[in-house]
């Protein structure tokens, strides 16, 4: 398709984008994409302001019952050295976040739904809320659970949930997941709906530039976020892991830099479509470009999740090859990030929870 600058300009003037419009925007070249970024920056300034919020990310365990074809900690990967942080280690990391005025934390792990696991999370949530007087925003990213479990976690102190739909193209979903009951697409969708029913701020997202993924698929993904009226989105480039089945179709992939650029366009277009949601600058961007997350902040994202997992465990939470920050302690990461964010003109919302404005604006016309 030959795309002209005028075509991009005329699309950017519309109030609503069609699937075709988005497909065109995602194919904008190096020069044309600056038009998209100019618009997304303007919208971010108006509806979000200049604050970037930190969420201290604690990847507390890589034990997982699932077998997603793309992920390095899938249960069948025998090369993954398994770990599970103690409550004390988790609480220490949380205290680090609070002390350093990160407004929020994210607890993430492989998926488990046994009672010992779900009860442990409830207890941790209660302890964190008590220890820090309810001052920290708490996001969970612990995979698919029942409505009862999500509700119990809300009662115990959780505010938000991240559950990426990974891809809204059902056929593609089954190319990247086993086609069985444990990995059913409908179940993931139902779980996402249940996070909202339980009263959590609902976050989802997709991997960008997956093998076999088309621009039309990505346009559908963005329209899905809009129709679902999601509060938060995290999208990162797909990066292959050599110990996974999907590594076998590596030849289908775009070069890393193109995956990066496409993710940036996805973030910018989404910011134009959903003005007041929280958009995370995914860690996977940093695996491709050392300042990848800060670049995402510049084109529309407003959330960064510094990794505060104890350094010795980070190397084992390898979802993809070359995961960044593996050797750094939490302090190193934060200091350099703060400087880079200030360089891009934003400020860090220290001590602020930075909830999704959309969650509170729902129903209002912007
Ligand atoms: N187990 C939970 C949370 C941990 S995985 C869950 O699956 O929801 C968090 C996210 O990492 C996934 O949603 C997926 O989008 C991303 N991820 C996994 N493997 C990846 C890879 N190879 N490249 C890029 N992102 C990946
Ligand atoms: Fe487990 Fe999540 Fe990785 Fe799937 S993406 S294998 S659920 S950690």
Image: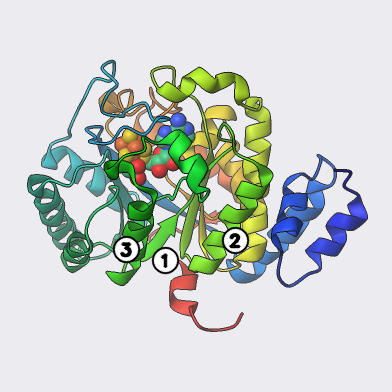
Q: Tell me what residue is drawn at x 60 percent, y 19 percent.
A: 251
> What percent of the width, then of the height, locates residue 282?
50, 42
Tell me how many marks there are: 3
> What percent of the width, then of the height, locates residue 220?
60, 55
**Number of other residues with Cα within 10 Å of mark 3, as a class: few under 14, some 14 to 19, many 20 or more:** many
Q: Quadrant of the C terminus?
A: bottom right
> In which quadrant of the rendered view does residue 66 lie?
top left
Foreground disc of the pair 3, 1? 3
> In which quadrant of the rendered view does residue 88 lie?
top left
Q: Quadrant of the N terminus?
A: top right
Badge 2 or badge 1: first in the primary sequence: 2
Ligand 1 within 8 Å of the CB at mark 3 = no
**Which of the pair 140/292 is nearer the observer?**
140
Name the side, left or right, on which 124 lies relative to 199. Answer: left
> What percent of the width, then of the height, locates residue 348?
50, 54
- Colour setup of the view: rainbow
Foreground disc of the pair 2, 1? 2
The numbered mark at residue 195 is 3
């Amino acid at each position: 398709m030959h795309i002209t600058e005028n075509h991009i300009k005329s699309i950017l003037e519309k109030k609503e984008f069609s699937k075709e419009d988005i497909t065109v925007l995602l194919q904008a070249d190096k020069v044309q994409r600056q038009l998209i970024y100019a618009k997304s920056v303007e919208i971010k300034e108006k509806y979000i302001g200049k604050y970037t919020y930190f969420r201290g990310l604690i990847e507390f365990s890589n034990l997982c019952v699932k077998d997603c074809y793309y992920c390095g900690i899938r249960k069948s990967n025998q090369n993954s050295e398994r770990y599970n942080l103690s409550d004390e280690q988790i609480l220490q990391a949380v205290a680090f976040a609070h002390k350093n005025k990160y407004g929020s934390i994210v607890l993430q792990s492989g998926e488990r739904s046994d009672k010992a696991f779900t009860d442990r999370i409830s207890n941790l949530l209660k302890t964190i809320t008590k220890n820090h007087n309810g001052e920290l925003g708490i996001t969970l990213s612990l995979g698919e659970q029942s409505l009862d479990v999500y509700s119990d976690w809300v009662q115990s102190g959780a505010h938000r949930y991240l559950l990426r739909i990974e891809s809204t193209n059902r056929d593609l979903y089954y190319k990247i997941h086993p086609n069985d009951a444990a990995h059913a697409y409908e179940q993931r969708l139902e779980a996402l709906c249940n996070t909202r029913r339980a009263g959590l701020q609902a976050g989802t997202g997709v991997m960008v530039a997956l093998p076999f993924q088309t621009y039309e698929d990505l346009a559908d993904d963005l329209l899905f976020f809009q129709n679902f009226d999601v509060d938060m989105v995290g999208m990162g480039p797909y990066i292959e892991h050599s110990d996974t089945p999907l590594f076998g179709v590596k030849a289908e992939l775009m070069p890393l830099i193109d995956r990066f650029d496409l993710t940036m366009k996805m973030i910018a277009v989404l910011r134009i479509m959903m003005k007041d949601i929280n958009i995370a600058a995914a860690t996977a961007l940093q695996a491709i470009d050392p300042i990848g997350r800060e670049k995402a902040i510049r084109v529309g994202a407003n959330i960064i999740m510094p990794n505060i997992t104890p350094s010795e465990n980070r190397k084992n939470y390898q979802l993809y090859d070359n995961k960044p920050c593996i050797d750094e302690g939490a302090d190193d990461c934060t200091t350099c990030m703060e400087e880079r964010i200030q360089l891009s003109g934003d400020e860090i919302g220290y001590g602020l929870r930075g909830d999704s404005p959309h969650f509170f604006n729902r129903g209002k016309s912007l």
